[in-house]
Amino acid sequence: MEREPNIVVFACNWCSYAGADLAGVSRIQYPPTVRLIRVMCSGRFDPDFALRAFAKGADGVLVMGCHPGDCHYVEGNLKAEVKVNMTAKLLDAVGIDPERFRLEWVSAGEGSRFASIVKEFTLTLKKLGPSPLLATPNVQKSSIAEREQVETGGS
Amino acid sequence: MEKTGAVLIVGAGVSGMQAGLDLAESGFKVYIVERTPTIGGRMAQLDKTFPTNDCSMCILSPKMVETAKHPNIELLVNSEVQKIEGEAGNFEVTIKRYPRYISEEKCNGCGLCAEVCPVKVPNEFDSGVGARKAIYVPFPQTVPLIYTVDREHCIDCGLCKIVCEANAIEHEMQESETAVNVGAIIVSTGYDLFDAGALEEYGHGRYENVLSNLQFERMLSASGPTGGHVMRPSDGAEPKKAAFIQCVGSRDVRHHPYCSQVCCMASTKEAILASEHAPGLKATIYYMDIRAFGKGFQEYVNRSKSDYGINYLRARPSEITEEKDTKNLIICYDDTQTGELKRDEVDMVILASALKPSLGSEKLAKILGIDTNTNGYFSARAEEMPFDTIKPGIFITGACTGPKDIPDSVGQASGAAAKVESFLAKAKGTLAAEKKEVPEKELQEEPRVGVFVCSCGLNIASVVDVKSATEYAKTLPGVVHAENTIYACSDDTQEHLKDLIKEHDLNRVVIASCTPRTHEPLFRETCREAGLNPYLFEMANIREHCSWVHTKEPEAATKKAKDLLRMAVARASHLKPQKTRIFDADQSATVIGGGIAGMTAAAEIAKQGFKVDLIEREAELGGTAREMNSIFISGKVPESVVAPLIEEVEKNKNINVHLGAKAIKLDGFTGNFELTIQKNGTDSTNKTGAIVVATGSTELKPEGKYLYKQNENVLTQSELETGLKQSKFDFESAVMIQCVGARDEERPSCSRVCCTEAIKNAINLKRLKPEGSVFVLYRDMMTFGGFEEYYKMAQEEYGVKFIRYLQERPPEIKEEDGKLKVTVYDSVFGKNLEIIADKVILSTPQISPEGTGELQKVLKVPRTADGFFMEAHAKLRPLDFTSDGIFLAGACQGPKDLTSVIAQALGAASRVCSLLSSGFIEAEAITAVVDEELCIACGRCTEVCPFAAIDIITSDLGEEKARVNEALCKGCGTCASVCPNAAITPRHFEKSQVIAMIDGLLEGMKDGT
Ligand code: FES
């Protein structure tokens, strides 16, 4: 069987997660490549999240938030945009094609948009092939030190 | 005399439960009387609901659990109202309690008795398709879960008595009576189904493979008699060709003249599900008109054709016969296109039985002293008072007032609750119980995670291998217990979950089922009751995000479900207990929109003692109704409703009306909003606790169609109304064209109200000028429910001519010698007709009014693709937005007739009052918190915080540190992601918790799960 890319999605609670729910309720089919992590707002997106996901072997990362003007926390989505752009540069610098990383706006009423983004992103990732980091030995066991820092620093 | 702060609800279906919950939440003592042994009503018998194919049990279960648990609600099942005395405000009601022959106190629902009982009888709950024992519960998720002995079939063998460890069986039990004192009564007795056997020509009861639609629903249900397998009763074979026959007993003068309103969509749903259950099935629906009039209905029908190949055939079969040896069925009907007699052979037939008033309605009406209409449904005092009866203090709601679908019943129930709340306003809280606080257990270091994998009937289990997912969960770090359950949200599972928390000393719970957006509150509450902090609970969404979207890839879906479980367990292990915050709520509300919906909501909220700001864009109150000639199909003039309402609103001291004003900015949160209103160029900001959106709809102007705006004799329905109102309208021959700009590619939905509007106006034209001729060119007449009778009246009494046209051959219009010539292909006679008309009236759909987009941006609430506002949940929460504290009512959610608009407005008022009545709001514990040791006071968080919730202060140690103002923080987490030192973090969305999910997901992938 062809290897399916694995995609980590950070989706805001109010729009994008709800949009994914609507895709479900409407039974719109899309490839089983995405796993959603729910955050209250796309503004919660932290560049570390994407770096961590790639370091652990993700083929792609999506950040999803409300359309500009619709964010429940005024402009968390615009703040996310700044961070996403910055992260893309960072990824480029470490040899990860910025095409593997994307920001998308999906509203609660856009179940079909959610599904088509997933479809299209999956295709893109298939074309790009597996993440280059997967070829590096021990990607999965990225440094213990980094982990510890996160755990102590995170609370 | 003081009024009593208690309410009696008769009938525990979804409307009775919703009304009960609203009232109980507002602080009334509620008694719910139910004739059968369980609450839940009809909805519990359905497999899925249209038009979303949402699982019926999953929507209903949380409500059943809540009803059963609420400290202010007392359930009296197996009971009936016997007698009432006293008067509005103080009724004494005598209730007859039928014996269960089982002690309600002792029975623990273990089911051993039913296992040993040797007597099998057809189960009424399964509409006779399945069997039950003589000692039984109607269905596994019965609430309360207490068995009942059916004495009629019991053979007194005594086996149950031997096995019952609780000693609960009491064969000597007698019928008894209880009396309750209540201030008001709500009747919500629902409906029954017409016995399809009474229509002999269809052979129900004679031919094995002819089923009623309810029997078929039970067959589709995973917990039903066939475990969700569609099969022919005669030989158990999967059907290849099935026929669904509409209007069985409905729209039929011999039985029920009205349209049953829900069957077209129900059959569409059943046909879709049947094709899912039996792939390759060819399903045909035999119909008279497809009444797809609600939100998303037409789209649903379109999808059933394009995605499932369901065939719709316009015919009313005259007879069904059975082939003796194959038990196949022959359907005889007249082809409406050719007039030929046709015969179709199928292997299964499903009859869409009419809805009728539930058994005993007549008797109950007598006992209570209220009226029924000619069809036997309870009748309201007036069209604009949908819940009032002729007897003060007694209200009606739901399908006992006429056929109704689920969202209408739920919305109406809240409306009836509002009427009771204002009627008994002074007695509120006098009889309410205190909520019990459960002490929280100590949290030990090591996570001990309990996992439930829900089958959700077949919603998850038909795609995801739930057994293997459960086994997999057991191997995950920290998991001490995992199990599979058919419905995680059912009442018995909640009890079981509580036991397991104790038994296994669980300190984290993960449920893999549906979306947390609908079910998390229920599960959190159960954890709380078991002494577990609700924030130690986590959900994995393996339905909306998995089984429903990867239907054809069971293996990949199972793998994904395991991944989601792994992520949830990883996160759960990092969760920490949190304390919810309690805030004072501003006990006032704001209503946006001064039409009938807005005014009704405002008046009702004000009646309950809260202050209301009413905002209207126009310079006058009244909305679109003001310009109409008549506002109900009965012909009532708007002045009789609008004027008194305007007067009520203007006179009420609690209501502050802002005309020519609009909302331009919203801050704060539920209970504590700050809304900025702009009026005459000046802005003012008000505090408000809740917001109701009631901005209505407006008629589409069909520019460029049918000579509209090119010929002055081509009008829209509302322009006709204005003409009639000003007595400026005259005609010789008028033609109305339906569905102009609706139910097409561009706007697929049906606008619900235009057919009844057309009939109303056609009748008005005929009244104005009996000798004039009126034609209505239609595609399907959407005269659902009681409107059907006006449709008949228009044809028979007034001589309005109805001509059906096909979507692919729409009517054409030409100007000729100063007259209009309309050519229409009559699909019944198969030829073109020419009508010379002096007036052509176009029925165009309702659309969302100007300014809706602007308001959406201010309130941050979603809209659907058609531009109308989108409710939190189509069935469960029709009057709420997802954002707490904001509600919606009336046509801003989708086109609606006025009675429904009023019902919704009252419902939304009730939602607002339940929210405001306690005076405080519990807010989620997701605010940010600063670790002062790590904070370097760089100030980046203060810059990005959209709510100015973070300040740099001097700490006790004299150092500069960031500090979060909890009252202002809304928990978006934006601050955390800019902090260079990971010193600030939002509770419950901590970095370690997010990273745990990422790691859990990706590290596990390597193990090749
Ligand atoms: S809430 Fe959706 S992006 Fe902010």
Image (cartoon, coloured by chain):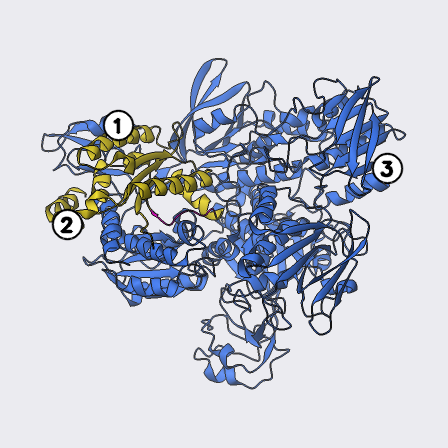
**Badge 3 is on which residue?**
B799
Read off the magenta span: A28-34
Helix, strand or loop status at disc 2: loop
Chain of residue at mark 1: B
Dot 1, crowdedness within 10 Å: few (<14), some or many (≥20)? some
Please identify which colour was used for chain B in the image: blue
Chain of residue at mark 3: B
Direction from residue B465 to residue B908 in the image, left or right: right
Dot 2, crowdedness within 10 Å: few (<14), some or many (≥20)? few
User: Is any atom of residue B95 visible in this view?
Assistant: no
**What residue sits 49% from the left and 38% below the top?**
B912
Direction from residue A138 to residue B217 in the image, left or right: right
Residue B702 placement: quadrant = top right
Helix, strand or loop status at disc 3: loop
> Mark 1 against mark 2, which lies toward the viewer?
2
> Mark 1 against mark 3, which lies toward the viewer?
3
* Magenta stretch holds residue B734: no
Q: Main secondary structure of the magenta part?
A: loop
Helix, strand or loop status at disc 1: helix
Q: Quick one: which residue is furthest to the bottom in this view?
A: B157
User: Is any atom of residue B480 visible in this view?
Assistant: yes
Which chain's colour is yellow? A
Residue A137's tag is: 2
